[in-house]
């Protein structure tokens, strides 16, 4: 007997143990009796794996009959539990069927990662019962309608838009522009949800970190909109926008590390100091600001107008970058990096890291990437003023300008 033959069953046992542990903990927490706990869920998952394995020998119909038979057994068992326990735990019944199906999925080697991932997600859904119930119970009609609007612009409108350029220069695509609209709207919506769950300070801070991994510009746009609508959350909005911008620098370093390791250390001082200065000033500003009260109410999780304004701004930046690049021609990597930084930093980071392997020196490539990051930071500062208000813009400037100054100083010294 080889280990490869036993491995799927071990995975099935672990899946059952994971979900069963949560179920057992829930029963202990509620101080009630239940039909199935840790041991039962382990056996359910193992039974699913055995059924799928036997189906390979007796045909696929065996697996269908096994699943159907188990669902009937679960239905009978939980229905009978009403008379004994005085309640019907339908969630546990569904969890039992899901565990059986995951055990079946784990019996196939190519499906093991999917089975494990789904088991973790299932356990997370079960474990967050109190939080999810509390949030859903607090939902208003506006929240539900805005969620549907978010789904429409992301899942209905976006796929219908053409991905071909619509301008004579071939740089502006409606689908690409709308993707930025969706991104800004989504970040604002996630920020709203996190504010409802965690409070304004922690919610917006986490939004900045998560959003910065995707687009710090979109985070700044969303935070500018929030600051304009709700003056009370300006300190947290400034903190979120700054954290997102500071997250951009490590993201660029990771890209460089993956493409060209030799460029990592020449680039580290500039981007590192900008990250440190930005985070230090952000935490200092938040600490000196007046704490946000718990009674702060943020309404309208979905606001399309600020997202559309950013989409128009993004299209303008793309056109301006293309025209400036055409005008300057091959004037140099520095001009190209500053032009590219108007819209995006990832593309120029990839380009410079690649060119540094052959035709470009490490010093020039590092400086070019740093200039792109600075240009992009200035663009976000402009967004803070244009889409936010003067107070928000001024506070962002107090942090962003020293960041840029620190980066320039390190470039000059190094």
Image: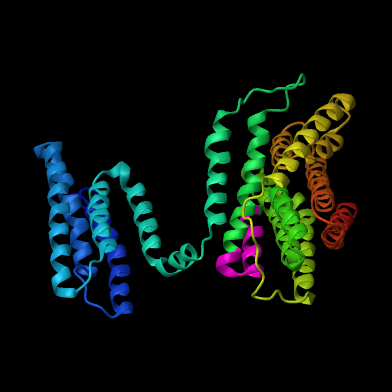
Q: Nearer the viewer, residue 66 or 408?
A: 66
Residue at x-position 29% and y-position 78%: 28
Q: Quadrant of residue 61?
A: top left
What x and y, as percent, mark residue 79?
A: 16, 63
Position of 127 compared to 317: left or right? left
Q: Quadrant of the C terminus?
A: bottom right
Q: Is residue 159 magenta?
A: no
Residue 408 in picture, x, y percent from top left: 88, 53
Q: Is residue 143 left or right of residue 71?
A: right
Instruction: Residue at the far top: name it.
Output: 168
Residue at the extreme left of the image, as rendered: 58
Residue 394's place in the image compared with 181, above or below, is below
Identify whether 414 is placed above or below 320: below
What's the residue at 89%, 27% (across, down)?
328
The segment highlighted magenta reads 195-211
- 327 lies above or below 362: above
Who's the residue at 46% across and 65% down the image? 137
Q: At 84% from the left edge and 57% from the top edge, which residue is drawn?
A: 393
Number of numbered discs = 0
Q: Position of residue 162 (x, y in %)?
A: 61, 25
Residue 18, image x, y percentages = 31, 64
Image check: 401 left or right of 143?
Answer: right
Most foreground residue, 64 or 279: 64
Up the image or down, 15 lies above or below 303; here it is below
């Amino acid at each position: 007997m080889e280990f490869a033959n036993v491995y799927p069953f071990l995975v099935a046992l672990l899946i059952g143990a994971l979900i069963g542990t949560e179920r057992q903990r829930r029963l202990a927490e509620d101080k009630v009796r239940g039909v199935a706990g840790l041991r039962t869920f382990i056996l359910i998952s193992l039974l699913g794996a055995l059924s799928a394995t036997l189906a390979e020998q007796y045909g696929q119909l065996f697996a269908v009959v096994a699943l159907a038979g188990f669902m009937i057994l679960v239905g009978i068992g939980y229905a009978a539990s009403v008379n004994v326990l005085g309640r019907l735990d339908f969630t546990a019944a569904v969890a039992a069927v899901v565990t059986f199906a995951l055990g079946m999925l784990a019996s196939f080697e190519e499906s093991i990662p999917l089975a494990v991932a789904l088991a973790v997600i299932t356990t997370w859904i079960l474990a967050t019962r109190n939080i999810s119930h509390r949030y859903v119970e607090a939902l208003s009609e506006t929240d539900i309608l805005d969620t549907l609007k978010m789904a429409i612009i992301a899942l209905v409108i976006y796929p219908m838009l053409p991905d071909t350029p619509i301008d004579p220069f071939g740089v502006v695509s409606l689908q690409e522009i709308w993707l930025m609209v969706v991104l800004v709207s989504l970040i604002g919506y996630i920020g709203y949800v996190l504010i409802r769950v965690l409070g304004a300070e922690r919610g917006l801070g986490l939004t900045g970190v998560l959003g910065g991994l995707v687009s710090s510009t979109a985070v700044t746009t969303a935070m500018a909109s929030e600051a304009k609508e709700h003056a009370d959350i300006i300190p947290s909005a400034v903190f979120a926008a700054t954290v997102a911008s500071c997250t951009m620098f490590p993201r660029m370093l990771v890209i460089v590390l993956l493409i060209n390791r030799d460029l990592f250390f020449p680039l580290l001082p500039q981007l590192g100091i900008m990250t440190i200065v930005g985070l230090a000033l952000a935490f200092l500003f938040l600490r000196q600001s007046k704490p946000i009260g718990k009674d702060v109410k943020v309404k309208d999780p979905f606001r399309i107008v600020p997202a559309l304004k950013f989409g128009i701004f993004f299209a303008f930046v793309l056109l301006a970058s293309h025209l400036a690049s055409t005008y300057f021609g091959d004037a140099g990597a520095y001009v190209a990096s500053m032009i590219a930084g108007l819209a995006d930093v990832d593309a120029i980071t990839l380009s410079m890291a690649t060119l540094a392997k052959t035709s470009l020196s490490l010093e020039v490539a590092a400086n070019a990437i740093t200039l792109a990051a600075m240009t992009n930071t200035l663009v976000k500062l402009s967004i803070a003023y244009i889409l936010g208000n003067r107070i928000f813009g001024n506070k962002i400037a107090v942090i962003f300008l020293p960041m840029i100054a620190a980066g320039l100083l390190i470039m000059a010294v190094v």
